[in-house]
Amino acid sequence: MHFDILLQQILNGLVLGSVYALVALGYTMVYGILQLINFAHGEVLMVGAMVGVTVVGLLAGSGLPGPLVLVLAIGAAVPVCIVLALAIERVAYRPLRNAPRLAPLITAIGVSIVIQTLAMILWKPNPIVFPDLLPTQPIEIGGALLAPKQLLILVVSALVMAGLMVLVNKTRLGRAMRATAENPRVAGLMGVNANQVIAATFAIGAALAAIAGVLVAMNYNIAQFSMGFIPGLKAFTAAVLGGIGNLAGAVLGGLLLGIIESLGAGYIGDITGGFLGSHYQDIFAFVVLIAVLVFRPSGLMGERVADRA
């Protein structure tokens, strides 16, 4: 096993895992407060990517530098996704807050299909090319190559995740979120407006998904109406792997899942004697999900109630 190939796969896995972690944080925050799996979250990522690629297309001939166009694309995607997530919470989830657990789950799947269909109508079924906005000359790290856009994904993801940790642990909103997660009724008696906290949680999760969506489209140079489904499922797997309801667990789960998937894609051909190729990499996320649910349902970091956000 050559070290440079191994390092390349690990770096690819960290890039992939950073995106999973961003999306998984949205899942885990909502679950921590509402005990609800928001299966429409992957579609929020997709809308972020589609808005981003639309802005990039509109600014294509403007002469603006690529990094600025990317910033503007993210700047447009984030508020659109926040409005979408707030609408989903208000229309689809809030009326079912005290309903049996299955009702909001089915609603979430229905909302996901509706958003995907509307996106297909609005942006058409064909994939849209996301042009390169950054230099394409790769950077060499210990024999492995990392494209500037991949380095940007790592840096942006790290900064956003660090900012979220500070928000949750050091701010008044973060204390209100933790209190609502601990006991919504007692938090209400202490002056915390649960509806506002829940709306803020959806908004923050949507902002993270919007950033992730633009980064995914930038990384693969393509955006399509169906692109949110698989990353959404994998991010959910990452949240379960780390311990759903635990922010640090979501980050750990995302990074681990990305590395497992990348290493699996790199070496599955050698392991199976060529029977399976790298295009089977999606199976690893779901093998991991099954294994976690069977052997450690609470995830690697458990669901420590006091730490939930």
Image (cartoon, rainbow, N blue to C red):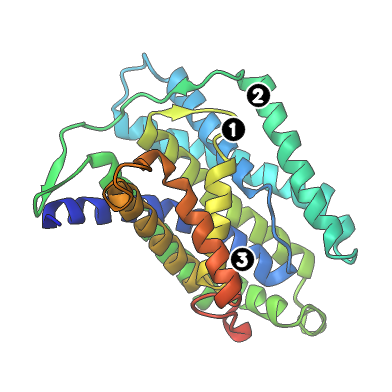
> Which residue is under mark 1?
226
Circle 2 residue: 120
The answer to whether one can see residue 155 in this image is no
Q: Amino acid at mark 3?
A: Met
From what the image shows, is residue 274 above or below residue 54?
below
**Total numbered labels:** 3
Q: Earlier in the sequence, mark 1 or mark 3?
A: 3
- Quadrant occupied by the N terminus: bottom left
Judged by depth in the image, the label closer to the viewer, 1 or 3, is 1
Q: Is residue 294 above or below residue 236?
A: below
Q: Is residue 303 visible?
A: yes
Mark 1 and mark 2 in contact? Answer it, CB < 8 Å: yes
Q: Secondary structure at mark 2?
A: helix
Q: Is 34 rendered above or below residue 15?
A: below
Element carrying mark 3 = helix
Q: Is residue 97 left or right of residue 34?
A: right
Q: Measure the C-alpha gap from mark 2 to mark 3.
A: 28 Å
Q: Is residue 237 above or below residue 149?
A: below
Residue 191 or residue 235, whichever sits in front: 235
Position of 131 compared to 48: left or right?
left
**Pointer 3: what residue?**
29
Tell me if 100 is positioned left or right of 112 in this view: right
